[in-house]
Amino acid sequence: ISNDLISAAKKYAHTNGPGCVVMTKPIIIKSRVSEIQNQEFEAFFADKDNVTMSMSYKVDSKTNLPLLYLKDNKKALWDKFEATYPDGIKRASFMARLANGRYVYRKDLGGLCNICNEYGYEVFDTLINIIQLNINEKETKNRLIHDVEKLRLHLRRGFENELSVNENGKIMHVDTINHCLLYTFGECNNQHKSRCANCDHLFTLMQELITILPENFYETIQESKDKLHYFLAHQARK
């Protein structure tokens, strides 16, 4: 009960006195969500640009469907949804569905867990800083920074989009060994016919940095490489 409603009731009783006619209850009209609007909502949150599916078999207790981790805060997602579907469901319905559905938002670190922040983000800033301070040749410096940024983009977005999971949350065999979650979990007995050049670039880039940079940075580069391996495993298992 809102304060405005209590205030209005007191004012009505004071004006009309004891035994007055009971106030007429306001008529609340609820608009039904159409099937098309339902499909628009489901399509929006089936897009890997907006969510990451849980790949560790975690399910929502209410729906028994795999959890979906939001890639942005709720306001930003609403703005994007409204721009995509201007005739879609209203904001209140959108937020209610997020609150009561299988959608998870990590409030810490603006939506990132600690592992994603330290292992998938800060490590790239460290590498770029080392390159900027210790490589004098401009062309080489710019190329390496570009390679680091390209790798960052792939590991943050491209890698997730390459992973294959069914609608029921089941994982399946993929011919590309870097993207086969069954292989990651040690459960794949099939042959893999190809490798991902973008994923393999992690190894070639780190080896080049070890070759070019002074010896006192070897430990930092190896530590960065280990963190990125851990980040990839974390992305595959979450």
Image: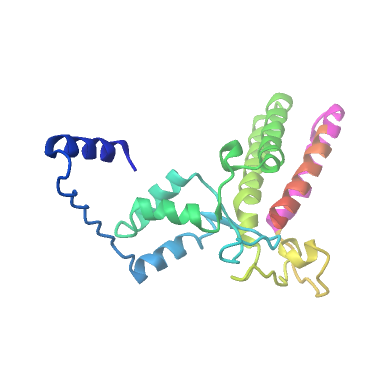
User: For residue 61, what is the image quadrant?
Assistant: bottom right
Left or right of 89 in this view: 214: right
Rendered-image quadrant of the N terminus: top left
Counting from the top left corner in percent of width and height, residue 4 is at 27, 37
Taking the spot 69% from the left edge, 53% from the top edge, the residue there is: 235
Identify which residue is drawn at 33% across, 68% down.
Answer: 34
Camera-nearest residue between 206 and 95 = 95
Q: In the rendered structure, does residue 212 fall within the stretch colored magenta?
A: yes
Furthest residue toward left: 16
> In front: 97, or 78?
97
Give the magenta range.
197-219
Classified by dominant secondary structure, the portion drawn in magenta counts as helix
Place residue 136 in its image quadrant. top right
Which of the image's four quarters has the C terminus? bottom right
- Residue in the image at 83% along x and 39% along y: 222
Residue placed furthest toward the bottom:
190
Residue 26: where, in percent of width, then height?
21, 52
Where 13 sits versus 204, above or below? above
Q: Position of residue 135 (x, y in %)?
A: 72, 28
Q: Is residue 111 above or below residue 199?
A: above
By what rule are the colours in the image chosen? rainbow
Above or below for 174 versus 219: below
Residue 200: x and y in percent read: 75, 54
- When asked about the image quadrant of residue 165, the answer is bottom right
Examine the rendered structure and indicate whether residue 35 appears above or below residue 11. below
Residue with the most extreme front position = 19
* Total marks in image: 0
Q: Any magenta on residue 111?
A: no
Residue sitting at x 17%, y 45%: 19
